[in-house]
Amino acid sequence: MTRRQSLLLFAAQAPKPDPYVILDQSVTLDQTNLDKLRGYVWTSEECSFYKGKLTRQQTYEINLVSGAMYWRRTESGGKALSGAELEAERRRLASHLEKPGPEYNWRSERQYLELLPKVHVATYLGLESIDGRPTHVIETRPAAGVRVYLLNSFRYKLWIDQADLHWRRAEITAIRNVEWLLHQLAVGRISYPYSNNIVNSGKLRAGAKTTVELQRLPEGIWTLARYLTESGKDYSNELRYFNYRRYSSESQLLTDPQ
């Protein structure tokens, strides 16, 4: 037997990592990671298409303030905002800052995914490399006889960084028709806290899939890179997140986009 054959045989006989342990450990990292992001501001571009036609195009500047994620719109339809639109953004920011932090109960959606290892059957698929970093690949599906409405509506395929145990990529597929708001909660573990006036509502058909891709900043912080939802051949919504940079103080929020 050659050395290569011996290594392959050893790998085949070695016990696979426990996917439930990996899932449990990955959930515990979320709070610490979000706390580190409070010193940053970043940019998001959103595009929606329906039957091949662009229906929405917006650009936002984002940071975490007053207990929630704040989106300040900077462009609409690929163009800079008008004077009236800029004034509306200033008023919205002032309203946001006046509200007490506890009103934004954004941690509640994370609690759903803490149940994932308990109410889904998980299968460990192996290791894959993303940008040179090994990641665990795990699939989950609802367990028979377990009634958790939100998590019973989706199956997951997850790529979890082997070293940091943070979710690196996720493919989340609706297995029955769901409310859009519930769908957002289903990916809450790897998204951000929402501003109250940003959360959308609507419906997704069974078979709709969301792909979420994350990136690791040089400082070791994990954060979103791309969030794509596709429903059949008719509808898609994509958000890209980039230009992460440090912010000196929440008091210096961009009340003047110039």
Image (spheres, helix red, strand yellow):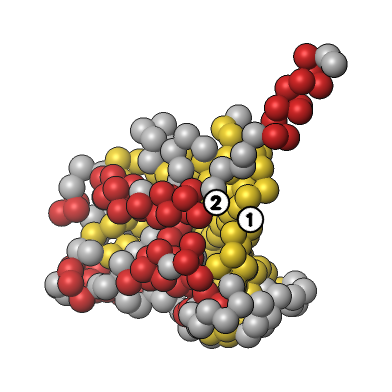
Name the residue carrying label 2.
19
Q: Position of residue 142 (x, y in %)?
A: 59, 72
Please tell me how many numbered marks the rendered image carries. Answer: 2
Residue occupying the point 76% across, 27% down: 8
Front one among 143 and 184: 143
Q: Position of residue 109 (x, y in %)?
A: 38, 70
Most foreground residue, 169 or 230: 169
Q: Could you tell me the amino acid type at mark 1?
A: Thr
Q: What is the secondary structure assignment of the residue under circle 2?
A: helix
Instruction: Count residues near mark 1 (Cα–Cα under 10 Å), then give few for <14, some for 14-19, many for 20+.
Output: some
Q: Are marks 2 and 1 in contact (CB under 8 Å)?
A: yes
Label 2 – label 1 distance at C-alpha: 6 Å
Which numbered disc, 2 or 1, marks the residue that appears first in the sequence?
A: 2
Of 196 and 160, which appears nearest the observer?
160
Residue 234: percent from left, percent from top: 74, 77
The reply, left or right, for residue 130 in relation to residue 183 is right
Nearer to us in this view, 211 or 128: 128
Which disc, if any, is residue 123? 1
